[in-house]
Amino acid sequence: MSPRSESANQAIREKRRTSIIEAAIDVFSSHGYHSATINSIARQAGISKGLVYSYFESKDSLLNSILHEVIDESAELVTQILAAKTTREKVLIMLQISFDYIEERPKLMRLLLGLSLQPEAVMVIQGQVGERTKEMMGFLEQLLHSAGIPAVKEETYLLGAALDGMALHYLFFINDPDYPWQKIKATFIENTLKHFNL
């Protein structure tokens, strides 16, 4: 039996790293960052504690990796938004991408919202990705500024808070079949565009 190639080994490492991160998201979102342990993450991933430590030196480094991936994904989405021709199209794409993210990654959204309520986790977030988060808020501010929005800084934070609230609401009602999410989402988008005269 021939040994695996370096590319095959790299693919295995990447797959294992991804499974650890997904397990960490599950554990952090369901038990809270403070209560989570490397043991519980290893159990969730179906691997040994030692193997987790061969990829991540600590629980903090695992959280940092998750947060950096989120920021990197956000940076990639900026490219999609900038490709649109009009400010209206850009805002519309930004809102749709935000809602797609909420729907497709509910555990990650639960984690991110939960972290904002955990003081020890907030310190990690601010220390590791604070500047990149400010950059993303700056991008949103520039986007609204290009539409001639007055009080643009306040409107930027208000829109961010509204999207956080929409995510929280969605997660709360996620298993309620009577929750009219699609209509709520469409109304929010329509009202936002009207509010910004787009």
Image (tube, helix red, strand yellow):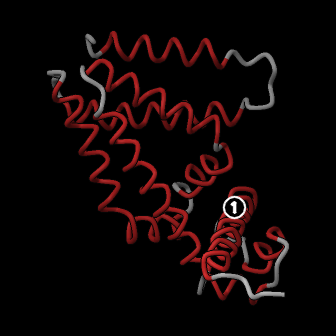
Q: Nearer the viewer, residue 185 or 10?
A: 10
Residue 37, percent from left and from top:
73, 77
Q: Nearer the viewer, residue 36 or 190?
A: 190
User: What residue is drawn where x is 66% and y is 76%?
Assistant: 13
77 relative to 9, above or below: above
Residue 55, percent from left and from top:
62, 82
User: What residue is drawn where x is 56% and y is 58%?
Assistant: 115
Residue under label 1, please give it.
Answer: 22
179 relative to 10, above or below: above
140 relative to 70, above or below: above
User: What residue is drawn where x is 75% and y is 88%?
Assistant: 3
Q: Going by the picture, which residue comes out furthest to the front? A: 2
Counting the numbered discs, the total is 1
- Does residue 94 appear left or right of residue 154 in this picture? right
- Does residue 101 appear left or right of residue 49 in this picture? left
Residue 79, percent from left and from top:
33, 41
User: What residue is drawn where x is 64% and y is 44%?
Assistant: 105
Picture quarter with the N terminus: bottom right
Residue 136, percent from left and from top:
31, 48
Asked which quadrant contains residue 38, the reply is bottom right
24 relative to 170, above or below: below
Asked which quadrant contains residue 182, the reply is top right
Asked which quadrant contains residue 78, the reply is top left
Give SS at disc 1: helix
Q: Are there few (<14), some (14-19), or many (20+) residues within 10 Å of tag 1?
A: some
Picture quarter with the C terminus: top left
What amino acid type is highlighted by mark number 1?
Answer: Glu
